[in-house]
Amino acid sequence: MHNKILGVAGCAALMLGLAACSGEDGADGVNGTNGLNGTSCEVQSLTNNTGYKVLCGGDSVGVLLHGKTGATGKTGATGKTGATGATGKTGTSCTVEAITDGYNVFCGGKEMGVLKNGAPGASCTTNRSEYGIVVKCGDQESTILDGKGCTVKETADKAGKMGLQMDCADGTSGTVWNGDNGTSCSAKAVTDEVTGKSGIQMFCNNELIGTVWSAENGATGTNCVSTEKEDGIVEVKCGDANTITLYKAMCGDASYDPAVKFCVLGKLYDKCDGKTYAISSQACVNGAVVSKCAEYKELKNGNFEYVTTRAVKDGEFCWNGIVTPKCGGKEFGQNQFCDFAFDGKTDSVYTYCKDQLEALEEVYDEFGLVLESSSSSSEAPQVAAGDEPLFGNLIGETPARFDVVDLKKFYASLKSLQTICNQGSAKAKWCGSKTYIDTEKFCDIRDNHLYKYVKIEGIDIWWMNENLAFEYRLPMVKSNKDDDGRSLDQVMGEVNYEEKVFENYEAAEGRYYTWNSAMGIGDFRATMTEEEIEALDLVEKDKTSGACPAGWRLPTKAELEMLKAAGESPENEKGFADIGFDFKNVGYYNVNGNNVVNSDKYAYFWSSDEVVTTTDDEQAYGMMITAMDKAEVKPTNEMYGFTVRCVTETNPAGEE
């Protein structure tokens, strides 16, 4: 069976309804040679019944011996019986005996201690001082602070340290203890009588605390030199000692440098611009970590066959885990698809209609995927250097391989949903990669520019409601040696154009055109009949001469005068705004002076009517709008560049 590989070269698109290119059939493969007949084998019992001999083709190839019977295990010894615990002693009975100021306590006839009665409380007196009320009970004196509800009195801890304790009505309390007297210390220089070493002795309260001896100079160290070798090996040599070999890291039996390589299950991999990655689901391409993706090829019968799992190449991306060509150089998400642009040749990314999203989710769910609203290729997580756990993130999960039968069904289901969306009652159309409603705008297919248009009451034509912006160039012509004439320079229906634009210049809105440029005077196609142009079988966008799009033309002088009259009508208080004609004052372009004139005062538009006069500099009629409700139609200079509003007798929306 002949197959074709799904590739990028020569194809505008691959999957999801893309217009894929078929490659040429490959040559049939050569038939394989017949294999040799296999050898017959048998087994024979050994004479001692210990096993079997294996014979193949009459020759002995080995012996199969019976396994030996395992030895019977020994019975374990019985453990010793634990000793009986001793009976606890009976508790001792206690009594008390009254004395003058308390009680003696006896347990088992033995005196254990004395419980004395508490002493009577001391009488208390109160006196006011500048700090509050002083309360004196016996020999104890305390002070109640004014306004604080606190008392302060002397106290002592178990060691006899004295202090002041404060207790307040709000529950706060604290004790300030008397500080200990500091210890007096001194130091004196001493010399060891045996070693002669000098030092300092420290005494506190005349008690020797310790001695600090002066240190001796250390021996001079030996210089060491380290040299880095390949594969993470470092050699260290110190003086005359033997060289020591160190290894930065080990992967199985191999050493390596962790700065440039990483180890997974005993195998080394080069880092990707200093980063590790999951080897099963990622790869390093041009210094970047990219996701691996499943590649499939489409067979002639429309089925698919799995090829391999690999990293994507230039012009590809990983769409839902499938190697997919980019669409006009762009990636697209799960809710988008690739199809021809308006010109029917290039590729453009489109979005599924809103009312199709529910059906789209069902298609993804049936294929085992989850539709995400703004998705593109799903990249596997990248592992930062030094952050990976042992093997986990470095192995990763191998990208899924889809069932090829389900894959065909998946693509077919997606294709059935790839339609142009409807917006309201008008059908949306494509202009390059943009959609538009043809009742509001029309598309110039020469450069995929959208223009608003309007039909003015009383004038039976449609007007462009924006300035023309097309960069008009003359077509190239070539000489025909056979008939000594000239012909249009074109290849396969596409015209070759001059590099320089033909007498048109950039404006704040649209472009300025000389009358020759607006009319297409000098365009070789203007000298040809319609039959001659049709005979060339040109693409649609290359059939038109002049600045206006196909089906559109410059207005006549009379049509400009009708527009002027409508804008100046007393019925229209806001002039041209009331009749729906939008304009912006951008002035005109003076070709001789190479400058813009009246850029913020007036608007100028060409007509198609030429001036019949003896004055060389007056060439055609144009209209100058001087105010919202004022305009003039008069002859103008051929070296001026005016803006252009094209007109048509045909409804751009195709309606009657």
Image: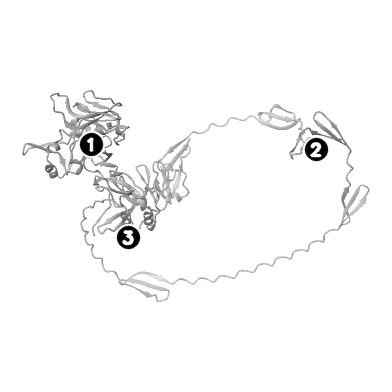
Crowd around label 1: few <14 · some 14–19 · many ≥20 (10 Å)? many
Name the amino acid, label 3. Answer: Val
Measuring 55% from the left and 32% from the top, which residue is drawn there? 219
Measuring 45% from the left and 71% from the top, which residue is drawn there? 67
Crowd around label 2: few <14 · some 14–19 · many ≥20 (10 Å)? some
Where is residue 60 shown, x and y percent of the image? 34, 70
How far apart are the two marked residues, 2 and 3, measured between alpha carbons? Answer: 93 Å
Number of marks drawn: 3
Q: Which mark is residue 405?
A: 3
Name the amino acid, label 2. Answer: Ala
Which comes sooner in the sequence, label 1 or label 3? 3
Which comes sooner in the sequence, label 2 or label 3? 2
For label 1, the residue is 646
Marks 1, 3: nearer the viewer: 1
Which comes sooner in the sequence, label 1 or label 2? 2
Measuring 53% from the left and 31% from the top, which residue is drawn there? 220
For label 2, the residue is 156
Where is residue 343 shown, x and y percent of the image? 24, 45
Q: Identify whether 616 is placed above or below 45.
A: above
Quadrant of the frame with the N terminus = bottom left
Instruction: Choose between 348 and 440: the one closer to the eye.
Output: 440
* The residue positioned farthest toward the right in the image shown: 100
